[in-house]
Each structure stands twice: as structure tokens, then as C-alpha cells.
Amino acid sequence: MRSLAIATRTCDRLLPGLHAALSAVPLLDLEKRGNPGVELFRAHGGPGLLIPAEYGGAGASALDAVRVVAAIASRAPSLAVGTAMHHFSVATLFMVVEAQGPEALETVLLREIAGKGLLVSSAGAEGRSRQSIVAPAMTARPAEGGYVVDGSKKPCSLARSMDLLTATVALPDGALGLMFAPADLPGISVHPFWASDILAGAESEEVRFTGVRVPEEFIVRPDLSDPSGVDAMQAAGFIWFECVISAVYLGIASALVERAVGAERGSVAERAALGVRLESAGCLVEGLARMIDQRDLDNDALARSVITRLAVQDAVGESARRAVELLGGMAFVTSPEIGYLLAASQLLAFHPPARTAIAPNLADYFAGRPFRFA
């Protein structure tokens, strides 16, 4: 696949050696719990992908980043899913730095992430049925020098490997806070949660906060007066999330389509149609990435990010199923990777926002009202 080749070259340029290192390990081994993928990601500079060069990172653009993510996903789906949350969190950190200036605490965190290969997990509302993505999973009560935080997030990707953690917290005055905290603070614990073998390598477990003391400077208060129900920084973060997570599943499906096209399965017309369907998703993801690079992050962009994600979800799911059909039954029964990739490619539907939950908001937006994400 031409697009996957471009993605691989981008990965080789920004994270030299990572794609080759992942390719040297059988895909199903990379999908197991305790696999070497996360450490390979660290060793090849993955944590610093989106961090600007002046802070010690690779300085990838959003367009570069989605290509790198797709390339990784084609070889290690669990790693791509887990680190998508890292990239989303790092993008949010950098937006705090842009808003507060280079003296912000988050500037130090960015340098530490890039320099030491630290991994950041995200403990938002994902995984809580019928909950807004901005609904806090944690509560904070005042304490000397800051807050005491309690709560639980499940699932939380990279739970076994995280060095830092971001989360939304409910503050005592009813306001929402964005917390950035070291993952080794006393009172933070990790517990088994993910029972499925599909994407088990993403380390999506339960993270509990029990009386965790967090310094005041580790919590940022966003402005929620925006009509979207989220502030500008959160909105940009959600656009990043929809873009990166869509790229993950694009990469997973690309691995299947590449097999079907490379084996010349089906007719020329069938292979062309398969490529068109998948590449339509790629065009949407890259278009959204270009919007991010142009700092086009307004309310319309937030709506477009959700529209893109839902359209990619449909295109990726259909492309993966069609690729497996063209590969045929014998390929399916003799290669466990094919069935695994097919199952993994369908899971974009489980990331927020859910189609049914966001449908009224989209209908209002299409009718001319501001888009509400919350």
C-alpha cells in the first residue's frame, strides 16, 4: 500500500529504527501482556514524537504524527492504541505551555518526557457508559498545599508503564480541573481490568486514586464558558484525540488491506474499490491533521473531528471486513494474525464519543447551532 509505505518512511525519519524493531517481533507476540513494544517505543524516542525540538523532542507535525501512528499500528496495534493516549496527553501539555508561557511547570514536564522517555496516560471519562468525555472521573478536596484526589479510571491505557498521568477532576467549587501528576504518587494503584485478548498489550487496566495528595500547581482550571461545553484547550485536545485514534485504526486496517492487495486477491476492480474505501479514510485523517497544523481549532473544527472519526470508523470497519473476504477462508484459518487484525480494527467504535450519544449534538450542529461536545 502506497500510503502505508509513506507512513513507514515518516516513522523511519522521525523515530529511526522503531518500525524495523517492531517488525522483527511477531505481531501476536507484540499483542500479549508484558510484550516488548512499550520499551522499544521508549528506546527509539517515541515519547518525544510530538514535543518540539527546542524541548528535546522529534518536533513532528500533526500530519507526520498520524502517519507515524498508522505505521506503528500496522505492526503493533496494542502499542499504537496505548501510545495514542500518550500523544493526546502530550499535545494537551504543550497547549498549556503555549497558553501559560515557557515558565509553566508543564515546560519542565515536556523536557522530562522527551529527555527521559517518560510515558503519559490519560484518565478521562472514557469507558464510563453514558458519561460525557469531560465528566470528571476523580474528585479533589482541599488540603494544605493543594488537593487530595480520590477516584478510579477503567480502562486506563499504559497503566503498567505510565510515568505521568493526566485526568479530569471535580473541584470543590463545582469547577473542572485538568490534573498532571507523577504516576508514583502515594495512593495511586493499578488493578487488573482488561479481560479480552484483543489489544491486551495496551495495558488498559484500572487506576485507582486513594487519598492522593496533589500539589495545587499540578491542576489547571479550564474556562468552560465556550458554547461547546469545553474550553479552547480541551477542545484542541479532543480534536487531537479523534485525529490520533482514527489514525491508529486506519493503520490496523491498512495491514489487512496491504495483504489482500499484495496477494492480488479478487479482481482488479475489487482491489481498486478496496483501496479507494480505505484511502478515503486516510484522506479524512490527514485532512484533520492539516487543520491541527494550521491551528484551525475552533468549534467547527471540533465538530469536523467527530465527523471524521465516525466516517473513518465506518470506512475502516468495512475495508477490514472486505480485505478478509478477498483473502479467503484458507488465509483466515491458517494465519491467526488475520483474525486478530480484523477483530482489532472494529474497536474504534468503543472510543468516545459513542455514535448514539453524540448524534443529537451533531443533528443540532447540522441544523446551524454550535456544536456541543460535552
Image (cartoon, grey):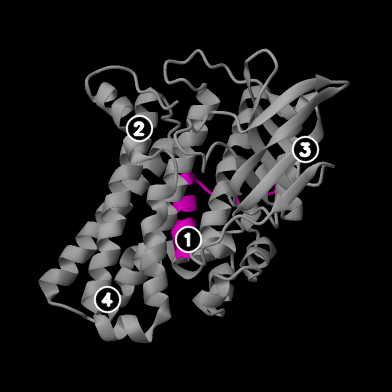
Pointer 3 with pointer 4, Cβ within 8 A: no
Q: Nearer the viewer, mark 1 or mark 2?
A: 2
Q: Nearer the viewer, residue 268 or 208?
A: 208
User: Label 3 neighbourhood size at 10 Å, few (<14), some (14-19), many (20+)?
Assistant: some
Residue at disc 2, secondary structure? helix
Judged by its main secondary structure, the magenta piece is helix
Is residue 26 shown above or below 354? below
Q: Is residue 37 left or right of residue 28?
A: right
Q: Is residue 309 above or below residue 31?
A: above
| Front residue of this view, candidates 342 and 253 | 342
State the CA–CA distance, disc 1 to disc 2: 33 Å
Quarter assignment of residue 361: top left
Of 315 and 22, which appears nearest the observer?
315
Circle 1 sits in a helix, a strand or a loop, which is it?
Answer: helix
Q: Which mark is residue 260?
A: 4
Expressed as whole percent of the image width and height from the top left, the position of residue 34 reads 66, 69
Q: Which residue is mark 2?
A: 358
Magenta span: 56-73
Nearer the observer, disc 4 or disc 1? 4
Q: CA distance from mark 3 to mark 1?
A: 42 Å
> How packed is label 2: few (under 14 Cα within 10 Å), some, or many (20 or more)?
some
| Gap in angstroms between the C-alphas marked 4 and 2 | 34 Å
Q: Nearer the viewer, mark 2 or mark 3?
A: 3
> Which of the pair 343/63 is nearer the observer?
343
As measured in the structure, the alpha-carbon distance from the residue carrying label 2 to the one carrying label 3 is 32 Å
Mark 1: which amino acid? Thr
CA–CA distance in space, label 4 to label 1: 23 Å
Closer to the chain start, of discs 3 and 1, is 1
Kindly identify the residue that appears in the image at 72 percent across and 55 percent down.
117
Residue on which the image places disc 1 = 10
